[in-house]
Amino acid sequence: MRAVLAREMEGRRVSGWVWRQRLTVRAALEDAGFGTEARNQNQPRGPRQRSGPLGDQPFPGLLPKNLSREELVDALRAAVVDRKGKPGELTLLSVLPELSQSLGLGEQELQVVQASGKESSGLVLLSSCPQTTSRLQKFFIHARRAQRPTATYCAVTNGIPATSEGKIQTALKLEHIDGVKLSVPVKAPSRKDILEGVKKTLSHFRVLATGSGCALVQLQPLTVFSSQLQVHMVLQLCPVLGDHTYSARVGTVLGQRLLLPSESTQRKTQVLDEALLRRLHLTPSQAAQLPLHLHLHRLLLPGTRARDTPIELLAPLPPYFSRTLQCLGLRFQ
């Protein structure tokens, strides 16, 4: 059995772990070393521009958004850690065929088994073996049915949850708002709603650290739905830092946060207060480019035998994520 693990989509830095034949070998994926500078052509110049303690690049670790397909495949191929099992790494689904050819997989097609969301950083699990893919999918399905979390995310939130840990339960549906399909909470869904695509969702959360009005939060989804974790944190009045899609649903009146109607709230760039901008050493225009601070940090995979302890796979934080933690005085252990 062969499978591949990697990090992440949409121009994010690639890093993670690879597991190989019979699920018994793990090899740490060293930093690929590409895309270590953020693009800053559109950043304003002048006395208002702030420079962080780590230099002038506000979001280290991001690749340019206008990469060509060839550059993207080259960057991914450069991140391969072990060619014995012909593993590789991906970012976009559209380049999987080129990536397969580049890695010498021949007619074997790479398939995504598990991945974080489009805007998130973190682990991506690939397989070129149908049997391995099937086994992994069954493992994840059985774990969800037993409400055993297999994925652990880290998030930086703008705001601190009212409780240090707990569950977030809500029904969600996909709805077209301003021409974009977004996740919307549904109160007391009927049986008809469930049949029409409304899904009950559940996540565990735990606050790991707080500082400067922000929190480092561990999130473990027990269901799968588009943008589930982002919407769940909005419901806690603590949107994920860099969430330019759902954060506008949290409003403020007389200094108190409140939830705005999802259907009538237009999505817009996340607005950060002046104090937080100073802590992050960002201008407002730079903050508009802030990447989503949601990272798939840990995955559990099945052991060789049914009763074996699951294999734990970890991915280090992206440089921009680590920089944010440093600016906010938050520690990730």
Image: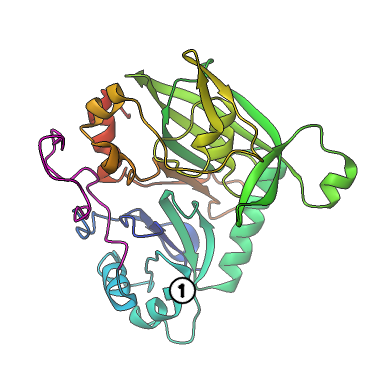
Residue 73 percent location from the top left of the image: 32, 74
Residue 171 percent location from the top left of the image: 73, 38
Residue 62 percent location from the top left of the image: 27, 53
Image quarter in which the C terminus is found: top left
Question: Which colour scheme appears in the figure?
Answer: rainbow
Is the residue 131 above or below the residue 250 in the image? below
In percent of the image, x 43 and y 49: which residue is there?
A: 120
Number of disc labels: 1
Tell me which corner region of the image, top left, top right, bottom left or bottom right, holds residue 67.
bottom left
| Residue 225 appears in the rendering | no
Is the residue 140 above or below the residue 46 in the image? below
In percent of the image, x 31 and y 71: which residue is there?
A: 72
Is the residue 60 above or below the residue 203 in the image? below
Instruction: Indicate whether residue 87 is drawn in magenta.
Output: no
Instruction: Indicate whether residue 63 is drawn in magenta.
Output: yes
Q: Among all residues in the image, which is located at the extreme right?
A: 191
3 lies left or right of 39: right
Q: Which residue is mark 1?
A: 94
In percent of the image, x 72 and y 43: which residue is there?
A: 145
For the residue pair 34 and 30, the one nearer the viewer reads as 34
For the residue pair 21 and 83, the one nearer the viewer reads as 83
| Residue 143 appears in the rendering | yes
Magenta span: helix, strand or loop, mainly? loop
220 lies left or right of 187: left
Secondary structure type for disc 1: helix
The magenta segment is: 38-66
150 lies left or right of 12: right
Residue 136 percent location from the top left of the image: 59, 58
The amino acid type found where label 1 is placed reads: Ser
